[in-house]
Each structure stands twice: as structure tokens, then as C-alpha cells.
Amino acid sequence: MSNLDLHPAPTECGGRGGVGAGPVRELSAGKEVRLGESTMVRRLLPTLGRRMVGAWCFVDHYGPDDVARAPGMQVPPHPHMGLQTVSWLQDGEVLHRDSLGSEQTLRPGQLGLMTSGRAISHSEESPREHAAVLHGAQLWVALPDAHRHTAPAWEHHAALPEVTGGGLTATVIMGELDGAASPATAFTPIVGADVVLAAGASARLPLRPDFEYAALTMSGEAEVDGVRLAPGSMLYLGCGRSELPLRADVDSSFLLLGGEPFEERIVMWWNFVARTNDEIARAREDWMTGSRFGDVHGYDGDRLGAPALPPVPLKPRGRVR
């Protein structure tokens, strides 16, 4: 997934300065951003007030969109470095291609995980013949310094473990939840889960007090720690929780995102996560000159050009403004 903003603002984040030391309830509606030719997304991370949740540094929620007579998602080839992309669908299909030669159609309940490491490029598009509805989330995970120059890799997991009980079914996308561990490669202590609540459900989900958490509502109106969440909104929950009370009057679902607070300070610009302005400038130059990030074959169209760098140097600072 790409940040297609033509004038991306540098985002300095990381460190523990903005971590909720205890349980909090910080609600965000995000902002609408156009992605590619025909997809509007709600951007929940980074926002003006919060930049990270654990190692999660970028969260887009899109749909449900009627794409029966539309091209659906169309994101041309673009670069990434220093992060992992997590692709998760609740409806529809997305065709992933990358510079490693991977080609995979993702469907609901399947995880597409791309580790960019030192450099990769990819494209995402709805197949020519696609379902009528497109609905999902695209997320990034910042790689710690010890692993951010690792070799790029692609993983597709068609089956993932589940936690069930009390009208709740949680599919573990990344990390571990209540004893169920995802097979996906993770480089920091992290969790990502798709939590589905049946109408009338009331449950308590075990959490780790040393993790910070957030809940992103995908559908319905789940009540998370007493806060009713409309679709597309995100509730930051802070740290210090051993369990999370949940209930729903109608069928609902949300993404639970969490992890150990990310101590390293990073700078994120366009589709790159780095540590210094020079690294960002070098990555942009390498993409524009056609080196380092490789080529994506099979996409019918040109690759994305990089926006201009901001006039002032990018500096890593804290997690919140």
C-alpha cells in the first residue's frame, strides 16, 4: 500500500513520550485521503495527535465500496523501505505484484505480508473480474534498526489461528493473542487481530499490560471498553490493561492493534521509514533513477514518481505532536 499524497508531510515518531502509561480512551475519526484512481480511504495513523501504536505506524481503512462497475483499487508500482505492509480484506480481492516476482490474489481472511527491508517495490489492483464490494485495511509496521536492512520478502497466509468464546471470534493476523500465534514473521512484540462480535455478544479479551492498544472499527458498532465505535473510527486504549471488555448489539467487527511501545525514533516520509533525512533523500533518488528497488512486471501502467522533498531537513522526534 502506498501513501499517494503528492505533498506528504514528514512524520517524526517513535520513543515512549506519547505512550498512554495507563488505560485511556482517545477517539479518532481519521481523515479522508484519495488512494489511486478510485479509492477513498480513512487514514487513522499517523494523525495530528498520534503517530504510532506499538510498531504500527500507518493505518488506512477503506470501504465498503461498491466497485461492481468501477475499476476498484488501482495503485501503480511504488517503493518501500524500513517497514512491513499488512494487507487485510473483509470483502473483495486485491492482486499483489512485487519486484521479487511475487504475484498473489488476496481474498478475505488471508494475510498478505510484505517485508520491505532495505528495498522493494510493488503494485496493488483489483483484478479485471472482481467482486462487487471492496472493504479492508492496509497497515504498516516499522522495522527496528536491527532488521530494517534485511532482505525483502513476501508472505501469503491463507489460514490463520482463531480465538473464540462469548460470541467472539478473533483471527490473529500478527503476533499472539490469548495463546494463539500467527505464523506471520514479526520483528517486534506485536499483535494484530480481526475481532468479530455476534449481535448480543459480551466478552472480555485478555491483553498484555506492557502493550499499548487501539481498536479500529470495520463494521457495525462494537462497544469497546464502554465506548461505542462507528465504522472507520479508532479508539486508542493506552497501556496497563489485562483485559478488554467488549459487547455488541448488532453484528460488528474491529481490528485490534497493539504492541510493545516502539522506543526507537524514526522519520516516515512518503513510502519510506528511516532514521535520518539523508536516508530518505537517498531512497527517493534511488527510486527516481531506477536503482535499488527493482521492477514490478505485469502492471498495465507507469510506476509512481516520488513527490518533492520538503524544503527543511526531516528530523526524528516523538510519537505525538
Image: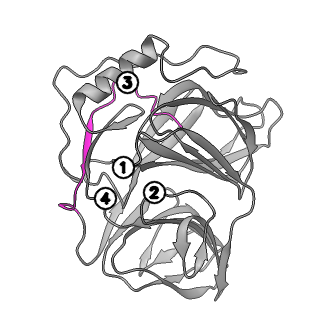
- Amino acid of disc 2: Phe
- The numbered mark at residue 262 is 4
| Residue 58 spot, x, y in % from top left | 42, 47
Proximity of marks 2 and 4: CB atoms separated by less than 8 Å: no
Left or right of 290, for residue 155: right
| Residue found 45% across the figure and 18% down from its top | 287
Identify the secondary structure beneath mark 1: loop
Which of pointers 3 and 1 indicates the residue nearer the eye? Answer: 1
Residue 271 among magenta residues:
no
Q: Whole-Å distance between the Cαs marked 2 and 3?
A: 22 Å
Identify the secondary structure beneath mark 4: loop
Which range is magenta? 1-18
Q: Is residue 53 above or below residue 197?
A: above
| Residue 246 spot, x, y in % from top left | 51, 82
| Residue 104 spot, x, y in % from top left | 74, 39
Left or right of 208, for residue 67: right
Residue at the spot of label 2? 187
Residue at the outermost right position: 129
Residue at the spot of label 1? 146
Residue 3 among magenta residues:
yes
Residue at the spot of label 3? 283
Proximity of marks 2 and 1: CB atoms separated by less than 8 Å: yes
